[in-house]
């Protein structure tokens, strides 16, 4: 009888452990929000004549490119992991900006705000990178209700644009 109880107990344990996998929490898939994309990548924006960006080391560039591909495939968590590794190696505005953009799509507006601020601090003060960083910062600030930050970001975004003078 003792042996039978041990076998029964073992079967109950095995059954309960194997059933744990059946109740795995289902997480909704990451999806890019078209409204956010339109807000931070407007179709009718004017191009700046100045473009400057810091160079990325080889390993950071590789991680950054892999993260962009993952992000393009809506694999946000994996892209974030790549970018955080890249940021540990070299802090760069491109990395911070992409992190901010991904967090914005994940609706983690506080993280988007933090990373967009870093991107504006690290990056160039003129050009398209500057504009996009401030657009992301404005979008995150608006969603967080940070009205003053939103207004400042919109103003600074306008200051990023450098238009070529008219030639005759």
Image (tube, rainbow, N blue to C red):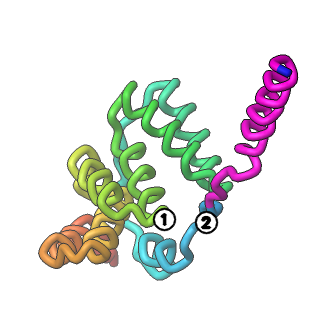
What numbered label is drawn on residue 145?
none
Q: Residue furthest front?
A: 1
SS of the residue under disc 1: helix
Q: Looking at the image, which residue is at 68% across and 50% down?
A: 24
Evaluate if marks 2 and 1 touch, with contact meaning CB atoms under 8 Å apart.
yes
Crowd tier of the residue under label 2, counting other residues whose Cα lies within 10 Å: few below 14, some 14–19, many 20 or above: some
Which span is picked out in magenta?
2-27
Q: Percent x, y for residue 109?
A: 34, 64
| Residue position for label 1 | 105
Q: Percent x, y for residue 7?
A: 85, 24
SS of the residue under disc 2: loop
Q: Is residue 148 above or below residue 125?
A: below
Q: Looking at the image, which residue is at 41% across and 43% down?
A: 95
**Screen quadrant of the C terminus:** bottom left
Q: Looking at the image, which residue is at 32% across and 68% down?
A: 140
**Screen quadrant of the N terminus:** top right
Q: Is residue 23 left or right of residue 149?
A: right
Judging depth in this view, the residue of 165 and 161 nearest the camera is: 161
Q: Residue furthest left?
A: 148
Quadrant position of residue 126: bottom left
Which badge, 2 or 1, comes first in the chain's sequence? Answer: 2
Q: Percent x, y for residue 46?
A: 40, 75
Could you tell me if residue 38 is visible in this image?
yes
Our reading of the magenta stretch's main secondary structure is helix
What numbered label is drawn on residue 31?
2
Q: Looking at the image, which residue is at 48% across and 65% down?
A: 105
Is 13 within the magenta? yes
Numbered disc total: 2
Is 158 within the magenta? no
Crowd tier of the residue under label 1, counting other residues whose Cα lies within 10 Å: few below 14, some 14–19, many 20 or above: many
Q: Is residue 8 above or below residue 25?
A: above
């Amino acid at each position: 009888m003792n042996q039978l109880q041990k076998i029964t107990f073992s079967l109950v344990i095995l059954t309960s452990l194997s059933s744990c996998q059946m109740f795995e929490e289902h997480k909704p898939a990451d999806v890019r929000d078209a409204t956010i994309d339109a807000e931070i990548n407007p179709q009718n924006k004017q191009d700046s004549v100045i473009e400057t960006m810091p160079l990325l080391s080889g390993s950071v560039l590789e991680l950054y490119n892999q993260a962009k591909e993952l992000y393009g495939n809506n694999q946000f968590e994996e892209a974030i992991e790549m970018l955080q590794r890249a940021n540990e190696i070299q802090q760069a505005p491109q990395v911070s900006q992409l992190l901010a953009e991904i967090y914005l799509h994940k609706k983690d507006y506080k993280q988007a705000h933090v990373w967009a601020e870093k991107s504006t601090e690290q990056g160039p003060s003129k050009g398209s990178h500057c504009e996009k960083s401030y657009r992301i910062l404005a979008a995150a600030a608006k969603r967080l209700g940070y009205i003053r930050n939103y207004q400042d970001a919109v103003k600074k975004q306008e200051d990023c644009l450098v238009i070529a003078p008219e030639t005759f």
